[in-house]
């Protein structure tokens, strides 16, 4: 007999056992397009500047750092994270200034810009993991049910890691008529999960697409990709520029610091607001994630070298993904921005704000945070005050 399940090749049988959350590998014309990309060489997508993708240093040292009891306690809040219960009333009225941002937690942001609604990296699932029973679990509830969010013109995905491309969220959105703007290759996952090819805008770096009066451009980032056990590096990662008739915004996705921010700013900036990754950094992977200081520096690069616009810190507070203290990204970003005079918004998850209006600035995380050391603070010059030693160790909430 032929054509029975028992006659399938070992590879086909393994593919049948592959979890749905792994998505699908690019094939056919999509794969051919990937191979033609100027950013694809030696069988993989390349970073704009060399970057080590895996952890550097000793794996044993990393494990000791990550699983040490006291460190684990520091990486979690001490109580319930304050979440703004976003309602339709918050979002029903058009933004008075034409631009409103609502941080939904981690890297998810709803941007209402010049009459359109753009949803970046939405993750409504309980875990950023291929499995519903294991992996990093969210530290606060979603501010609003996805179904109550209202119509979205376009969903923008920065790359295919689980904390940015979430299977439950995409499957829920697949039943709507929204469009999806994704980096090259990522469309294979979305089609596998039920998104029609006609609703995909799949872009290589520096390619653009138009949705109404908005222009969306995939711009370079310094990161990597992959969802399955065999990481083929056949899906691209990107930052994103959205330009409307009156406003411009930037979403960094995940990235290490690199000189290309200056080029992006020169080509598309300055920006009314940037959404910059400032969490999940570590000395074990310095090339692929930014510290808050590097995040502030990247914002300045995007603005032509000087303070301007508003920085919205993202990629922190929702999932425990790195050895640093849970609230450290917020504190460090505040210090780094104050040092250069850069305006920063610190909304609670789900709290809408308009960059041209009053910015949310309260250090809300301090109420549920343990004491935070500040090794990034620069010592005061000799003879300036006598409180330097005490200021090098600030307690959350003492400012």
Image (cartoon, helix red, strand yellow):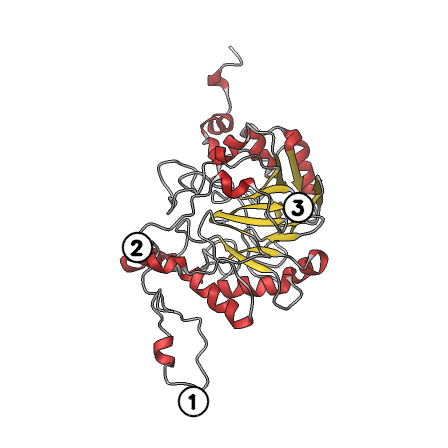
Callout 3 secondary element: loop
Q: Dot 2: what SS?
A: loop
Residue at 44% across, 82% down:
380
Cα distance, mark 1 to mark 3?
Answer: 52 Å
Q: Earlier in the sequence, mark 1 or mark 2?
A: 2
Find the residue positioned furthest to the top.
Answer: 1
Q: Give the structural element (helix, strand or loop) at label 1.
A: loop
Q: Up-down: is 39 above or below 168?
A: below
Q: Determine the CA span between mark 1 and mark 2.
A: 38 Å
Look at the picture and state if 302 lies above or below 387.
Answer: above
Residue 96 bears which disc, if any? Answer: none
Q: Which residue is mark 1?
A: 383
Dot 1 alpha-carbon crowd within 10 angstroms: few under 14, some 14 to 19, many 20 or more: few
Residue 386 point in image, percent of width and height = 37, 85
Nearer the observer, 379 or 206: 379
Sequence-wise, the earlier of marks 3 and 2 is: 2
Above or below, comparing residue 386 to residue 193 in the picture: below
According to the picture, the residue beneath numbered tag 2 turns out to be: 78
């Amino acid at each position: 007999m032929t054509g029975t399940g028992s006659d399938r090749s070992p590879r086909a049988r393994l593919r049948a056992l592959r979890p749905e959350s792994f998505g699908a590998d690019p094939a056919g014309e999509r794969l051919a397009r990937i191979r033609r990309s100027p950013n694809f060489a030696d069988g993989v997508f390349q970073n704009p500047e060399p970057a080590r993708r895996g952890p550097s240093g000793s794996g044993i040292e990393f494990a000791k750092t990550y699983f040490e009891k006291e460190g684990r306690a520091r990486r979690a809040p001490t109580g319930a994270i304050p979440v703004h219960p976003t309602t339709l009333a918050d979002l029903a009225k058009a933004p008075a200034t034409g631009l409103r941002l609502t941080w939904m937690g981690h890297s998810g942001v709803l941007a209402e810009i010049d009459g359109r609604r753009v949803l970046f990296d939405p993750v409504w699932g309980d875990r950023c993991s291929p499995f519903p029973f294991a992996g990093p679990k969210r530290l606060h509830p979603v501010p609003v049910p996805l179904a109550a969010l209202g119509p979205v013109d376009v969903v923008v995905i920065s790359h295919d890691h689980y904390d940015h491309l979430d299977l439950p969220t995409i499957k829920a959105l697949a039943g709507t008529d929204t469009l999806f703007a994704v980096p090259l290759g990522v469309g294979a996952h979305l089609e596998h999960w039920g998104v029609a090819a006609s609703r995909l805008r799949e872009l290589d770096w520096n390619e653009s697409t138009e949705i109404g009066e908005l222009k969306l451009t995939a711009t370079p980032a310094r990161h990597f990709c992959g969802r399955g056990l065999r990481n083929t590096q056949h899906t691209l990662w990107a930052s994103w520029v959205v330009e409307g008739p009156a406003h411009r915004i930037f979403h960094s996705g995940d990235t290490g610091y690199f000189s290309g921010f200056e080029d992006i700013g020169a080509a598309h900036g300055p920006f009314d607001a940037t959404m910059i990754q400032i969490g999940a950094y570590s000395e074990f992977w310095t090339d692929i994630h930014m510290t808050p200081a590097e995040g502030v520096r990247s914002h300045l690069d995007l603005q032509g070298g000087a303070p301007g616009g508003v920085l919205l810190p993202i990629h922190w507070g929702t999932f425990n993904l790195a050895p640093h203290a849970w609230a450290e990204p917020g504190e460090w970003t505040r210090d780094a921005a104050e040092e250069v005079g850069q305006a920063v918004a610190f909304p609670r998850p789900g709290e809408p704000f308009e960059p041209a209006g009053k910015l949310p600035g309260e250090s809300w995380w301090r109420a549920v945070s343990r004491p935070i050391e500040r090794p990034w603070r620069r010592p005061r010059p000799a003879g300036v005050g006598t409180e330097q030693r005490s200021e090098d160790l600030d307690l959350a909430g003492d400012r």
